[in-house]
Image (cartoon, coloured by chain):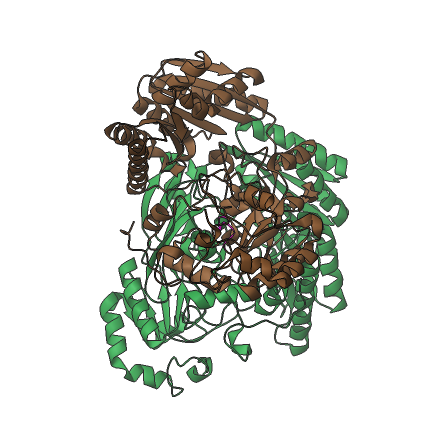
Chain colours: A green, B brown
């Protein structure tokens, strides 16, 4: 992709002769590299190429990669970027699935990986203070000796960084009981587009002192500021857990079970649903680890041993009453891990179903009111079969968060278009059912059009805030808002039907 | 107070000849009253006087009181207010303690009390949808048959409205276990200064679709929009609860107990602390219901009966190990209620201690890192004794939220000034210890100077957002930001020491 095509033509970042011009303006490059030092700076082709990608299907091209060491360096770099209108794309581990870390408009990729210190664990204050580059599971390993943890558990937990989790409001299987990242951010420090350092929120459990800027930063995907420190609430680690594997002969029955369990009320620590396409794919690829059925629920309960026991009995009772064909219970960590890994292997299992075909994530991460899960899964199946696409649906049923994977020959243009049409209809169905296009992955690049339709009444307010905090649109430009598809950069109203 | 003195001189709301001018512009009045009808409109002296006050020490004067019935009426009124630059102060039950509902700049008080419908309780979706005028305890009574509740439990729960709770991020005794209002707002609808209706967030448990506008609205005190509907997460009601009353001979010992209990880890549903002044006052006024000691903790644990039993044993063990003089346990609702009401009667008890003296709340609602509670209480005692003021300190020790009451003869100017100096030093000490001037009451009018000092790095970003969303400063003007004390209306930087 030629660099020039990545430029925003309405923001005078660089002259359109572009990369040459940047490279020639050695003074700017020197100023930036002198701030972070040789080890924190690269403009080499290899480096900038490596940072062109994240875990999404998109790519961009940065002019330079910066790895700051502290908030002061971040602030100094932002001052230069602000002065010269240089785009800055902050980046964690690049595990995001929607393109949030792609340097779509060139400029600087700011890799936060070197700011990876756990600054403080204060159990008596129920919080920890971390730099954004701390890896999620590293933090939990550090918290374990105290009997505490930071619960959101994203699927990429072994790689993803806390800063990225905050930027995308990441979560995972445990959100129904423990909430998402937004529920744990007590405070954070961020650097604004103009280089100002802002301390938002506080190191206290309660906070009614003005606007909740820390919570506004959660999910802002690097478009409002660079997060340089996070104060996270921590919570006691459950003593033990157990699981139930439940097979149903109808998807609706599984849906009724979920509703009945919650109305009990029993809030499981996780409740995963798999449809028959997902089950078939896993069984074919992995030698039938799962019961052959139309829908499967994996329920996890956690806490004190006696409560776990009691809740597991309730899960079985509710499941049998709802009409579960098969109920299997386990306290064995090995068995539970094998069930969980079956659930996690849907994508790879699907890819091995048909030679030349691969599994693609075009419509993932829809979130719905919990009670709408069965009708949504049915509708997704109907949509995909109408377009002749094999679709697997699974996800965190108890918090309403569904993922789908499509099996297509991606080299076949017709199949790709059918997959895209399927994705679009899945998003529209989700919105019609009162859901949202992103539960835990963010909007990034991939979900912009549907996000703008879904949030049509809110988008202009979001744009007002963006414009107020980043008047030159240098922070992660091209994300969330389709600036480049609009005739005016700001004050846009996307022509979508209201919610 | 003459009406003219309440006008903002830099915003041309009305000519300074003021109320006469408003009254004469019968066309505006007619347009507004025709929107809400006779029952929803009053400009009578009696009505506007009644709405001059809330539960704080401040007062203002509105030109008219409006009671809208639905979001459409709110939007139509805001369109007129926007066109004519009329200040609008939204109001719930007026139970706020910091002046957030005072119509400081005249104009319209928008009383949301008539929008008091619980629109939907959806247990299977773990949420309810309510209008802002629903009273907190009414909502909980409606949720009780389902076995669910909305936990924040503000002290004014029998009167305060959900809209006000959201506007102030209210909470109460249970926040250490259950969080504050901000942790329950999944979505909300609000009307902007210009009359636009915005749907923020969604009716789903997860949400990574763009900026968390719903959470930004939490704690914005009516300065960013009028809340017309709230989607709240609900949570299972604990089956039972029990309490421990713990007497300590040193404040530090009580503080060590709190830290030890949390490090156990055991998160109580509430943990109230009273210092010796509070204990003495209650004992003298109410016939010695409490043990005579230097510090008292009331710990509540809740949940399933077997867990409550287990946790109560832990509380006793940790308390004895920390050096509690006296430990009393109870499962009896009557006994527990009497303990709780002793704690709640500090203010009145203090007022009856000395004839002619009364208890005033100048420095209430400080919030600190939990571990700083003992040193903070000690410091508050030292400050008040240095100024010759009798000070009682008590509060939600496990979430770090402290309240103080001072006993003074409020007619004595010297005593009042001493109380004010004491309050100022208490706030400064709180900030120095890493705390915040408001945990659950908001900033309103009373906390503006200390809030601006505490949040000195964040205040200009808050002002940018305010300006972007309410360019004419018509929404609850005079709150949060000290507009009127600044020479420029926007873009201010308050000259305070950084945090």
x 57%, y 40%: residue: B93
Q: Nearer the viewer, residue A54 or A124?
A: A124
Q: Is residue A61 above or below residue B190?
A: below
Query: Which quadrant of the structure image shows residue A233?
Result: top left
Seen in the picture, residue B93 relative to A34 is either above or below; the reply is above
Q: Is residue B224 visible?
A: yes
Horizontal relation, residue A99 to residue B493: left or right: right
Q: Magenta span covers which residues?
A: B219-223
Q: Is residue B354 above or below residue B440?
A: above
* Residue beneath the point at 36% across and 13% down: B325
Q: Is residue A393 magenta?
A: no
Is residue A170 visible in the rendered structure shown here?
Answer: no
Q: Position of residue B196 (x, y in %)?
A: 60, 63
User: Could you tell me residue A389's position as x and y percent?
Assistant: 70, 67
Q: Nearer the viewer, residue A73 or B40?
A: B40
Front-lying residue, B477 or A402: B477
Question: In this figure, what is the number of numbered marks?
Answer: 0
What is the quadrant of the C terminus of chain A in the image? bottom right
Residue B149 position (above or below residue B196): above
Near-viewer residue (B200 or A239): B200
Would you identify the image quadrant in which residue A266 lies?
A: top right
Q: Farthest top residue?
A: B287
Residue A110: x and y in percent read: 36, 66
Q: Position of residue B231 (x, y in %)?
A: 62, 48
Prevalent SS, magenta region: loop
Residue at the far bottom: name it.
Answer: A17
């Amino acid at each position: 992709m030629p660099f020039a095509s990545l430029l925003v033509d309405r923001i005078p970042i660089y002259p359109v002769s572009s990369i040459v011009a940047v490279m020639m303006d050695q003074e700017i490059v020197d100023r930036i590299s002198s701030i972070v030092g040789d080890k924190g700076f690269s403009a080499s082709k290899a480096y900038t190429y490596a940072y062109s990608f994240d875990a999404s299907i998109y790519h961009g091209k940065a002019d330079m990669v910066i790895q700051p060491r502290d908030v002061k360096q971040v602030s100094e770099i932002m001052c230069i970027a602000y002065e010269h209108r240089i785009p800055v794309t902050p980046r964690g581990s690049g595990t995001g699935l929607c393109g949030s870390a792609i340097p779509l408009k060139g400029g600087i990729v700011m890799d936060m990986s070197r700011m990876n210190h756990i600054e403080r664990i204060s159990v008596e204050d129920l919080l920890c203070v971390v730099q954004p580059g701390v890896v999620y599971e590293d933090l939990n390993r550090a918290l374990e000796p105290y009997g505490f943890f930071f619960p959101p558990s994203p699927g990429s937990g072994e790689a993803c960084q806390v800063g990225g989790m905050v930027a995308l409001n990441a979560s995972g299987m445990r959100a129904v009981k423990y909430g998402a990242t937004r529920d744990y951010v007590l405070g954070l420090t961020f650097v604004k587009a103009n280089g100002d350092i802002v301390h938002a929120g506080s190191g206290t459990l309660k906070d009614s002192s003005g606007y909740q800027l820390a919570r506004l930063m959660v999910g802002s995907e690097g478009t409002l500021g660079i997060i340089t420190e996070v104060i996270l609430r921590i919570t006691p680690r459950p003593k033990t857990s157990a699981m139930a594997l439940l097979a149903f002969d109808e998807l609706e029955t599984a849906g009724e079970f979920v509703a009945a369990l919650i109305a009990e009320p029993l809030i499981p620590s996780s409740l995963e649903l798999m449809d028959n396409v997902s089950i078939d794919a896993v069984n074919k690829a992995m030698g039938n680890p799962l019961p052959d059925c139309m829908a499967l629920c994996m329920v996890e309960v956690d806490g004190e041993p006696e409560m776990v026991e009691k809740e597991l009995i309730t899960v079985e009772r509710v499941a049998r009453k709802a009409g579960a064909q098969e109920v299997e219970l386990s306290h064995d960590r090995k068995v539970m891990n094998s069930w969980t890994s079956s659930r996690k292997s849907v994508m790879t299992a699907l890819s091995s179903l048909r030679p030349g075909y691969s599994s693609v994530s075009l419509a993932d991460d829809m979130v719905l009111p919990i009670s709408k899960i069965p009708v949504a899964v049915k509708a997704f199946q109907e949509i995909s079969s109408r377009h002749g696409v094999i679709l697997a649906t699974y996800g965190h049923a108890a918090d309403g968060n569904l993922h789908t994977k499509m099996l297509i020959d991606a080299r076949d243009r017709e199949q790709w278009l059918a997959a895209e049409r399927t994705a679009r209809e899945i998003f529209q169905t989700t919105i019609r059912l009162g859901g949202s296009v992103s539960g835990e992955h963010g909007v990034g690049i991939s979900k912009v059009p549907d996000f703008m339709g879904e949030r049509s009444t809110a988008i202009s307010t979001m744009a007002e805030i963006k414009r107020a905090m980043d008047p030159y649109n240098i922070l992660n430009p091209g994300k969330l808002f389709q600036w480049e598809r609009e005739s005016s950069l700001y004050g846009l109203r996307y022509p979508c039907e209201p919610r």
